[in-house]
Image (tube, rainbow, N blue to C red):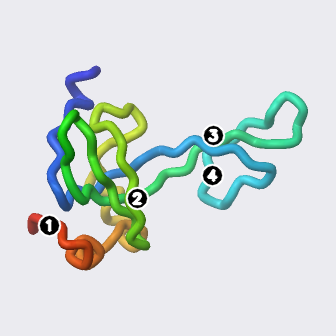
Amino acid sequence: MTALRNHTYQAGDLVVYTLPKQSPTPGPRARSIHPSRMGDDYSYLVDKFWMVAEVLPDDKLRLVTRRGKYRVVSAADSLLHKAGWWQRFRNRGRFPAAEVLQMSGAEVRST
């Protein structure tokens, strides 16, 4: 199973990061919703659609959001995976555009 997750990431790759969250009101894209013991909050998962901005040393990736914010995660993180063709097609408006990377000075490979 670890061999399946051992991806080689490059700048410009579209990725999906499954972010665990907790709040009193889950949003419309929340899934796997579970109430807390006392019933005040919910824990749930939300898929975030990001792009690889840069491959850093020590197996780290610098990811960029649609609005240009950055986050550094491990390439071996089990919550991270490359977007498949169906995810890229279905959520094409939720991924960052290549212009976001070009404004930051990162080089994007063409696909």
Instruction: Report which residue position mark 2 lands on.
Output: 49
Residue occupying the point 13% across, 67% down:
107
On screen, residue 74 versus residue 36, left or right, reads left
Q: How far apart are marks 4 and 3 (CA)?
A: 7 Å
Foreground mark, 2 or 3? 2
Crowding near pointer 3: few (<14 within 10 Å), some, many (20+)? few
Crowding near pointer 4: few (<14 within 10 Å), some, many (20+)? some
Instruction: Report which residue position mark 4 lands on.
Output: 30
For badge 4, the amino acid type reads Ala
Q: How far apart are marks 4 and 1 (CA)?
A: 30 Å
Identify the mark at residue 32; answer none if there is no mark: 3
Image height of 8 relative to 16, above or below? above
For badge 1, the amino acid type reads Val
Mark 2 or 4 closer to N-term?
A: 4
Mark 4 or 1 closer to N-term?
A: 4
Image height of 26 relative to 74, above or below? below
Identify the mark at residue 108; answer none if there is no mark: 1
Residue occupying the point 36% across, 48% down:
72
